[in-house]
């Protein structure tokens, strides 16, 4: 992705003119075309009636674009209000849980997923953490040694929220498939940042939010269900869309929309459809290359700031666009707020987001830079200058 292409994309993104945004892992900046798609649908609803303006082609566009992104089929895609809601619906549909059922997770599992799993543990299931390898990633070798007939689920957060780690999702999927074990991937930070091929990943369920690197609107999320796995999942909440009346009773749909309800924001799906199509048009290979180039350079330069400590995991040559750090003398939330006063957005995470990993590493909080292909070298210079100033250091 050359500079001219980056400038074109930035010019089509209103937020780039008003803020320096390094919080794409929290929520990214939408394009004007995405905003227009949402507003135009709302206008149609206001003028012609919300129900009457519910154009089914919008949902079809979004589903087709999501399927292309994941190398799947539209029938395998459901939409939800958040990634956590999507994961929770799929997890709860995998039950009922029995005493002795084993659930294997990585140490980096998202806190919201752990909250859902806690209910299964309350029913007698056993939650076990797969050991990490020397780089801090989930160890595939250790996982293989933990497999037995009682393992009912392997759950992986692919890209943790509190580090630049990229877990070996494909290798873990090969283990799960070999043993016929259900495999759930939380791809919240991966979608829109890395190529994501569900066929290669061998996952049964995958979820991700629309608002992050996909640059879609808040209140949207994707849920992929492998077609051959669909019948194993029995949703706990149904309505006339997910289980329509067939003349004799209410029958579950045979596609992923068994996890949807009849009430949906068509306007938000219009925005998501546009964001997905933009992402597909750019291609994940060049998106990944751009983010990787920016983040490698930034990590190296951050290490030169006295008092700044990086808290990333994984090999230095294979990390995501998330950079976790702390700055001596600064609380992470206060640091985020101080930078925001100067027009620079970053993120800050506490223990609740990734409790097992944060506790294992003795971290109470981290500040987080999350890069997008929209970011520029000039913005990075401003960020570094601000951090040096807050660290009490002069310029280069």
Image (cartoon, helix red, strand yellow):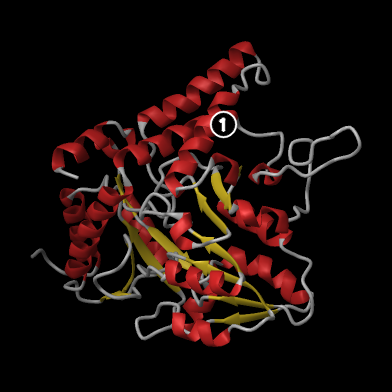
Structural crowding at the residue carrying mark 1, measured as other residues with C-alpha within 10 Å and reported as few (<14), some (14–19) or many (≥20): some
The foreground one among 384 and 285 is 285
122 to 198, vertically: above or below: below
> Which of 267 and 197 lies nearest the eye of the viewer?
197
Residue that badge 1 annotates = 59
Location of the N terminus by quadrant is top left
The answer to which of 302 and 266 lies nearer the viewer is 266
When the figure is inspected, residue 29 is found, relative to residue 173, above or below; the finding is above
- As helix, strand or loop, the secondary structure at mark 1 comes to helix
Q: Position of residue 232 (x, y in %)?
A: 71, 59
Residue 369 position, x and y percent, is 33, 60
- For this orientation, the residue located farthest to the top is 47
Q: Quadrant of the C terminus?
A: bottom left
Can you give x and y, in whole percent of width and height, for residue 125 in the image? 73, 78
The vertical placement of 29 against 357, above or below, is above
Q: Is residue 77 visible?
A: no
Residue 78 in percent (x, y) is at 60, 44
Specify whether 146 is left or right of 165. right
Residue 197 against residue 240 in the figure, above or below:
below
- Quadrant of the rendered image containing residue 81: top right
For the point 20% across and 50% down, the residue is: 379
- Total numbered circles: 1
From this viewpoint, is residue 301 visible? yes
Give the residue at the far right of this rendering. Answer: 248
């Amino acid at each position: 992705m050359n500079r001219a292409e980056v400038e074109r994309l930035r010019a089509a993104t209103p937020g780039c003119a008003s803020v320096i945004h390094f919080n794409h892992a929290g929520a990214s900046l939408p394009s004007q075309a995405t905003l227009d798609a949402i507003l135009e649908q709302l206008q149609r609803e206001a003028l012609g009636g919300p129900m009457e303006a519910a154009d089914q082609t919008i949902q079809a566009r979004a589903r087709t674009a999501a399927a292309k992104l994941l190398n799947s089929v539209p029938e395998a895609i459901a939409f939800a209000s958040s990634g956590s809601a999507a994961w929770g619906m799929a997890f709860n549909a995998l039950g009922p849980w029995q005493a002795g059922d084993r659930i294997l997770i990585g140490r980096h599992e998202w806190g919201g997923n752990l909250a859902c799993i806690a209910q299964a543990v309350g029913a007698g299931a056993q939650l076990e953490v797969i050991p990490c390898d020397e780089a801090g990633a989930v160890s595939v070798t250790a996982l293989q040694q933990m497999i037995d007939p009682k393992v009912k689920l392997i759950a992986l957060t692919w890209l943790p929220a509190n580090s630049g780690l990229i877990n070996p999702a494909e290798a873990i999927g090969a283990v799960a498939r070999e043993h016929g074990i259900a495999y759930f991937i939380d791809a919240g930070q991966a979608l829109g940042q890395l190529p994501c091929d569900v066929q290669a990943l061998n996952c049964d369920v995958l979820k991700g939010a629309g608002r992050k690197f996909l640059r879609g609107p808040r209140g949207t999320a994707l849920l992929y269900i492998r077609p051959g796995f669909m019948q194993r999942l029995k949703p706990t909440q149904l309505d006339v869309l997910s289980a329509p009346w067939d003349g004799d009773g209410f029958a579950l749909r045979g596609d992923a929309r068994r996890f949807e309800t009849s009430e949906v924001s068509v306007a938000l799906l219009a925005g998501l459809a546009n964001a997905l199509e933009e992402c597909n048009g750019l291609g994940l290979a060049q998106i990944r290359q751009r983010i990787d180039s920016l983040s490698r350079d930034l990590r190296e330069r951050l290490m030169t700031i006295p008092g700044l400590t990086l808290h990333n995991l994984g090999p230095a040559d294979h990390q995501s666009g998330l950079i976790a750090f702390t700055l001596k003398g600064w609380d992470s939330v206060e640091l985020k707020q101080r930078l925001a006063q100067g027009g620079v957005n970053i993120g800050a995470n506490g223990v609740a987001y990734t409790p097992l990993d944060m506790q294992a590493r003795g971290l109470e909080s981290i500040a987080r830079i999350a890069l997008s292909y929209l970011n520029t070298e000039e913005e990075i210079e401003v960020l570094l200058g601000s951090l040096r100033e807050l660290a009490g250091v002069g310029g280069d």
